[in-house]
């Protein structure tokens, strides 16, 4: 935190306790009732414009204008609703602290507040308690959230924030990848295990030792921002945790699987298959090597292999063919029956709150009640309909269909996301789910994920990675941040792993890899690893019991 901001907080601290003390008293307010009719979305159009502002986190303010203007006009015309989105190109924590200290903040905070970020808004009476408002104006909020609703209610029966990005979306996020056209040229030899994958990449590298510019090619380069926790899923662990029959958790450093995983990646380095710049590159550098066809395989998030691969090649190579791409493939370590690659937090990314600055919180909840429905989610997720290249079409009777142009380009892999953004797709998120809707034709807020069976390569990915996603909420939602000591221990362990794992993988021999691994484990134990494990196990089991 900057010194100036810290000084401001200290100066204002005595007054903060008394700020905004009327937040709960307006909880039973009713929404504007006078209307001029009902639009095709089922929204009762108010005679007076419903207008409110919301802070949406860190972003470029120019993007709000670029991507929000068309949606602004549509909402005002069709709904008589005016939303003012506020973003700053500064750190969210810093901005939230400044808002609290200065008293200058909007009607809604929709920056995916964590529990730690939410707490001061509640304790300082600057967050509106929502239970009565939801009871009176938000029946669809309770309907859509269903059994999840109780997870956002505190021990005293109060609810201060509704979730954003909630629900289980069973699509893959992480996988291994293989260069499809090169694999096909080899006769597409079958592979299943991590060992099979290693041997295949080794053979492919022998066939493609350099790119067209004569630069060295490697089997793998560690993807920046990929944590070893996620990779342990190939060895049967759940995002870095080994769970026993009694739901006790053991961190991967303390497991034989963790050592096996580290030795596996070290083998790439020992045999000269791992890019020596691994662990030293930022994403743009990694992307440049990937785009220059200097990497045979990839283990990590699937979209980066698209973003750094064929999405660039199809625009820069006039001879590019559809087979020139990386395809997601399922692997498992020998002896492992089930892999866990894409953990999901059904509770959502964070919370959205109404502040005590809101003149009529009931109108805001009424809007949220629309936004959380399937039609509201589509509008706010897919953008303005009914234009030539819109994502979708809404008919006067309330029925809808995909716009053929947008659908066909998405399926063909030539969809222009910049164009979709210009219609306001995904610009004004506040309470929307990411899960597929419960309808005959289920849809999700993510436009591109609505065609996973129609789009050839999305279908290949979905089929290959089926069953590798799981609900990991009970682990993810353990409140480490609530315990200052445990938060410090967790950060120490993360720092130790960040450097120790890189040293172990890039060690010149398996023996040295074991030595570096042992040193990493020892350092983590000295930092409190065993205490951290117990804290996580206890919290995990507590969550499982509370959410039955």
Image (spheres, grey):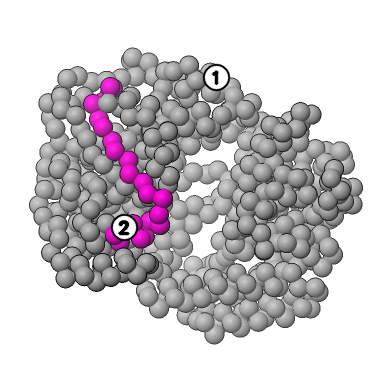
Q: Nearer the viewer, residue 105 or 353?
A: 105
| Quarter location, residue 251 | bottom right
Does residue 197 appear to the left or right of 539 in the view shown?
right
Residue on which the image places disc 1: 405
The quadrant of the picture occupied by the N terminus is bottom left
Residue drawn where x is 41% and y is 61% of the image: 477
Does residue 396 appear to the left or right of 291 in the view shown?
left
The quadrant of the picture occupied by the C terminus is bottom left
Q: How far across and how far down the image is residue 87, in percent?
A: 36, 46
**Image height of 216 relative to 484, above or below:** above
**Image height of 516 relative to 167, above or below:** below
Q: Which residues are magenta?
A: 77-98
Residue drawn where x is 24% and y is 51% of the image: 105
Residue on which the image places disc 2: 96
**Residue 335 is at least partly visible in this image:** no
| Quarter location, residue 401 | top left
Q: Dot 2 lies on which element?
A: helix
Q: Residue lying farthest top?
A: 396
Badge 1 crowding class, 10 Å Cα cut-off, few under 14, some 14 to 19, many 20 or more, is some
Badge 2 crowding class, 10 Å Cα cut-off, few under 14, some 14 to 19, many 20 or more, is many
Q: Nearer the viewer, residue 310 or 197?
A: 310
Q: Is residue 83 magenta?
A: yes
Q: How far across and how far down the image is residue 450, in percent?
A: 52, 32
Does residue 97 appear to the left or right of 349 in the view shown?
left
Query: How many discs mark residues in the rendered view?
Result: 2
Query: Gap between marks 2 and 1, in whole Å?
Result: 41 Å
Residue drawn where x is 32% and y is 25% of the image: 73
Residue drawn where x is 81% and y is 59% of the image: 273
Numbered disc in front, either 2 or 1: 2
């Amino acid at each position: 935190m900057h010194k100036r901001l810290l000084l401001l907080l200290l100066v204002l601290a005595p007054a903060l306790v008394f700020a905004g003390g009327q937040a709960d008293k307006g909880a039973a307010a009713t929404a504007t009732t006078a209307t001029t009719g009902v639009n095709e979305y089922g929204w009762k159009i108010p005679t007076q414009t419903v207008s409110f502002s919301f802070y949406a986190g860190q972003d470029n303010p120019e993007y709000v204008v670029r991507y929000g203007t068309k949606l602004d006009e549509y909402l005002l015309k069709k709904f008589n609703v005016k939303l003012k989105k506020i973003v700053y190109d500064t750190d969210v924590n810093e901005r939230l602290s400044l808002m609290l200290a200065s008293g200058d903040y909007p009607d809604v905070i929709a920056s995916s507040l964590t529990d730690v970020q939410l707490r001061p808004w509640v304790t300082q009476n600057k967050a509106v308690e929502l239970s009565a408002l939801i009871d009176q104006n938000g029946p669809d909020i309770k309907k859509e959230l269903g059994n999840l609703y109780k997870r956002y209610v505190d021990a005293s029966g109060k609810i201060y924030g509704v979730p954003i990005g909630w629900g289980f979306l069973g699509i893959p996020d992480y996988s291994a990848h293989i260069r499809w056209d090169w694999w096909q040229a080899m006769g597409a030899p079958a592979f299943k295990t991590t060992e099979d994958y290693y041997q295949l990449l080794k053979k492919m590298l022998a066939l493609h030792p350099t790119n067209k510019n004569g630069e060295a090619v490697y089997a793998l380069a560690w993807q920046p921002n990929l944590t070893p926790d996620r990779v342990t899923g190939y060895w049967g662990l759940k995002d870095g945790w080994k769970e026993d029959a009694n739901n006790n958790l053991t961190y991967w450093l303390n497991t034989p699987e963790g050592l096996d995983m580290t030795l596996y990646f070290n083998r790439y380095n020992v045999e000269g298959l791992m890019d020596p710049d691994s662990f030293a590159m930022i994403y743009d550098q990694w992307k440049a090597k990937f785009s220059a066809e200097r990497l045979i395989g990839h283990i990590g998030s699937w979209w980066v292999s698209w973003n750094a691969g064929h999405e660039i090649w199809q625009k820069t190579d006039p001879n590019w063919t559809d087979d020139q791409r990386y395809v997601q493939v399922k692997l498992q370590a020998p002896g492992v029956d089930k892999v866990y690659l894409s953990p999901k937090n059904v509770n959502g990314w964070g919370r959205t709150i109404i502040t005590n600055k809101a003149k009529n919180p009931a109108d805001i909840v009424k809007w949220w009640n629309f936004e959380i429905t399937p039609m509201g989610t589509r509008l706010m997720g897919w953008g303005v309909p009914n234009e030539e290249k819109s994502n979708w079409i809404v008919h006067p009777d309330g029925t809808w269909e995909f716009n053929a142009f947008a659908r066909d380009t998405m399926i063909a892999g030539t969809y222009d996301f910049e164009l979709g953004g210009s219609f306001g797709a995904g610009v004004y998120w506040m309470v929307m789910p990411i899960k597929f809707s419960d309808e005959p034709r289920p849809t999700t807020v993510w436009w591109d994920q609505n065609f996973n069976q129609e789009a050839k390569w999305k279908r290949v990915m979905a089929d290959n990675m089926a069953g590798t996603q799981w609900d990991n909420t009970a682990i993810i939602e353990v409140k480490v941040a609530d315990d200052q000591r445990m938060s410090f221990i967790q950060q120490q362990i993360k720092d130790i792993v960040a450097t120790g794992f890189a040293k172990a993988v890039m060690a010149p021999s398996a023996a040295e890899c074991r030595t570096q691994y042992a040193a990493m484990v020892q350092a983590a134990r000295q930092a409190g690893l065993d205490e951290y494990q117990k804290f996580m196990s206890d919290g995990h089991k507590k969550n499982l019991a509370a959410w039955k």
